[in-house]
Amino acid sequence: MDIVGNGFLARQLRPLADRHPDTVALAAGVSRAGGATDADFAREAALLRDTARRCAATGRRLLFFSTAAIGMYGSAGGPGREDEPVTPGTPYGAHKLALERQLRDSGAEHLVLRLGHLVGPGQPAHQLLPTLVRQLRSGVVRIHRGATRDLIGVGDATTLVDLLLGLGLRAETVNVASGFDVPVEDVVDHLSRRLGLAARREYQDTSAGRHVVSTEKLRRLVPRATTLGFGPGYYRRVLDEFAASAFA
């Protein structure tokens, strides 16, 4: 597998580099759900267009990483499903959905994976977990009231990516997530206990409410997903591993 990119996700995929020779993984582009500019979005669209053109010319499959976060599924009336129309609630979600359509129209063989919130050592400082740890250390943590996130360990996500690629899927979209929405306040509670850090909490009222990601299709395609420990308490193990790396 050829990997385009050198960031957090690209590094996690490197152990798969000798597998799936028919695939090009596009693990580069916008990873910031908030604060990205139109220029950032345009650069990712251009990169996807160029990569899809090369894949179409060589007959290789393009693996594209989209999002299963609230920006994509926040307005869903129930669990966010891959086979139902979605109305993105953020510019980032709208951008990723537009790129999915761009890829489908490109003529390249492809597989789209909508990712939950990846958690693991070395993830970008602007993402949720590093931000919360940094705020806890500062003594003040800001919480969006009622917000939830679907957290998935990056190692588990990589395992699922490997298994999904091994199925030879084409022209499919699959959610790769735990399937359980965790209140951000519970995430802060667990990190605070695990790191031994107490902080004053400031609550902000936003439109970022609850959202649940459906993993029905993932579990049907990859039965092994049921052995990875996903459940209401799964996030605690993921946070424990992340907290250990924060003090390593």
Image (spheres, helix red, strand yellow):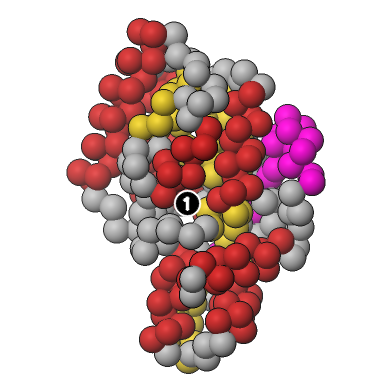
Residue 234 in the image: above or below residue 15: below
Residue labelled with disc 1 = 71
**223 is higher (above) or lower (below) than 138:** above
Q: Residue at x 48, y 91 (%)?
A: 200
Please state the horizontal and vertical placement of residue 83, each as a whole percent of the image: 63, 31
Q: Nearer the viewer, residue 107 or 239?
A: 239
Q: Residue at x 74, y 49 (%)?
A: 228
Amino acid marked by disc 1: Gly
Side of 120 where 134 appears, left or right: left
Q: Residue at x 39, y 54 (%)?
A: 33
Quadrant position of residue 223:
top right
Magenta residue check for 37: no
Query: Residue 50: where, in percent of width, then height?
Result: 28, 22
SS at mark 1 in the image: helix
The part of the chain drawn in magenta is 209-227
- In this picture, residue 195 sits left or right of residue 52: right
The percent coordinates of residue 22 (x first, y second) are 50, 16
Number of marks drawn: 1
Specify the quadrant of the image occupied by residue 135.
bottom left
- Image location of residue 133, percent across then percent down: 46, 75
Front residue of 79 and 6: 6
